[in-house]
Image (cartoon, rainbow, N blue to C red):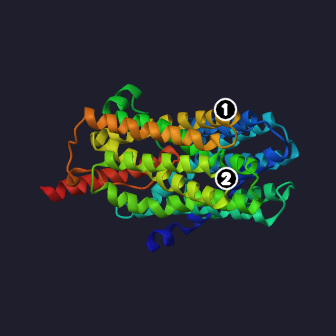
Amino acid sequence: MIQVLGGSWALFLGLFMLMIGNGLQGTLLGIRGEAADFATWEMSLVMSAYFAGFLFGSRLAPEMIRRVGHVRVFAALGSMISAVLVLYPAVTDPYVWTFGRLVIGFAFSGVYVTAESWLNNSVTNENRGKALSLYMIVQMGGIVTAQYVLLLNDPSGFLLFIIPSILVSLAFAPILLTVSPTPAFDSTKPMHLRALIAASPLASVGMILLGGVYAAQFGMAAVFASRAGLSIGQISVFVSSIYIAALISTYPIGYLSDRMDRRQLIIGLASICALGGVLGFLAGGTFWMLILAAAVIGGTSNPLYSLLIAYANDYLEREDMAAASAGFVFINGCGAVAGPLAIGWTMDTFGNPGYWLIIAVLMAIMAAYGVYRMTVRPTAFSAEDLVPYAPVTQGASPVAVGVAQEVYIEADEEQTTTDR
């Protein structure tokens, strides 16, 4: 891990600053939207736009890189991010914010594709798995750090929007001054959805449901917390607890996933997450119960992303894994786009606790479907035959998921060679 950090520290530093900027703007908009008396459906539209832009950007960014190169794409999209961050406080309008979130989602997606391709180019087969783990830690650490930047100033002013704009601009310096442009790459076309669903119905259904839960955490958590009457400090703790729990639980869950029937683990995690949603629904305004519910949901739902990919890989040929990963990113992204809209409707219908209700329902459906799939497809693998688990976050671009697939493939090939 230290060797990977020593060789790519500037890239990780730049990515850390980018994640602070991205993690801060979503929470800050949730707080400012409540102060501006935006309707719930307006805030759900604002939050949904980010995921729509991100999904679109992940498909278009590779073509942009092929045409003009990594450096130009990175610099151009980074400039767009900085500009939009300054625009938010200048024009307090839900439709302007929706457009800004669409642009910033598109831009962050392209920036991640570019940075992650640089990262993949800088590592070897021997340390790719460690680099992926470090990247996940940097992502989570940046989002958590962002929540405490909120405490530096009054959210009603301009400074907290200027800080992420500055951080995003500064992130270019260590990256562009230390990395070499990588050759334009060929993006992998997603596997046809019908083939993907046929290969692993549970992973496919789980991905779209998990996209809605991810949107609840990354998009709507601050909206809920603001409407629940939490203070700025409490909102910071509430949102950060989601990602701290995710970081803590990822590796133990990865350990278990390589040693047991993955469907049982998927069902168990989904069930615990659903219970976390029920706990949040019943918590009322009790702060520490809300923190506990957020930690349970973050610690169970986030590792499910990697677990579902690993489970699907058990049924895929090696040559199909990259195409499947691109397909899963698309399915998960569609769920994330719909998630804030569904949560907004639920909060309007059932009140603010409806935020927890939609999470509980989505994860209960995943658990129930997992039980059904176990009756349809008996377990076909022993623990020794499972494709190894590799951690990756839902906020990563298809490039990072592709890197995870390379780790899967290399580990599988090594395991096959050892067994011979």
Q: Residue furthest left?
A: 420
> Is residue 82 visible to the viewer in this orientation of the structure?
no
Q: Residues within 10 Å of mark 2 (few under 14, many from 20)?
A: many
Tag 2: amino acid: Asn
**On screen, residue 42 above or below 389:** above
Q: Position of residue 297 (x, y in %)?
A: 53, 52
Q: Is 123 in front, or is 16?
A: 16
Tag 1: amino acid: Trp
Circle 1 is placed at which residue position?
A: 345
Name the quadrant containing residue 319.
top left
Circle 2 is placed at which residue position?
A: 22
Looking at the image, residue 183 sits to the left or right of residue 81; the answer is: left
Q: Secondary structure at mark 2?
A: helix
Q: Is 337 in front, or is 121?
A: 337
Q: CA distance from mark 2 to mark 1?
A: 25 Å
Looking at the image, residue 344 sits to the left or right of residue 364; the answer is: right
**On screen, residue 175 above or below 400:** below
> Is residue 74 visible to the viewer in this orientation of the structure?
yes
Question: Total of numbered circles in the picture?
Answer: 2
Q: Position of residue 68 (x, y in %)?
A: 60, 42
Looking at the image, residue 393 sits to the left or right of residue 25; the answer is: left
Q: Position of residue 274 (x, y in %)?
A: 49, 45
Q: Residue at x 81, y 38 (%)?
A: 38
Name the quadrant containing residue 149.
bottom right
**On screen, residue 291 above or below 386:** below
**On screen, residue 245 above or below 27:** below
Mark in front: 2 vs 1: 1
Q: Secondary structure at mark 1?
A: helix
Q: Residue at x 70, y 55 (%)?
A: 24
Q: Residue at x 60, y 40 (%)?
A: 54
Q: Residue furthest top?
A: 194
Q: Position of residue 200 (x, y in %)?
A: 33, 35
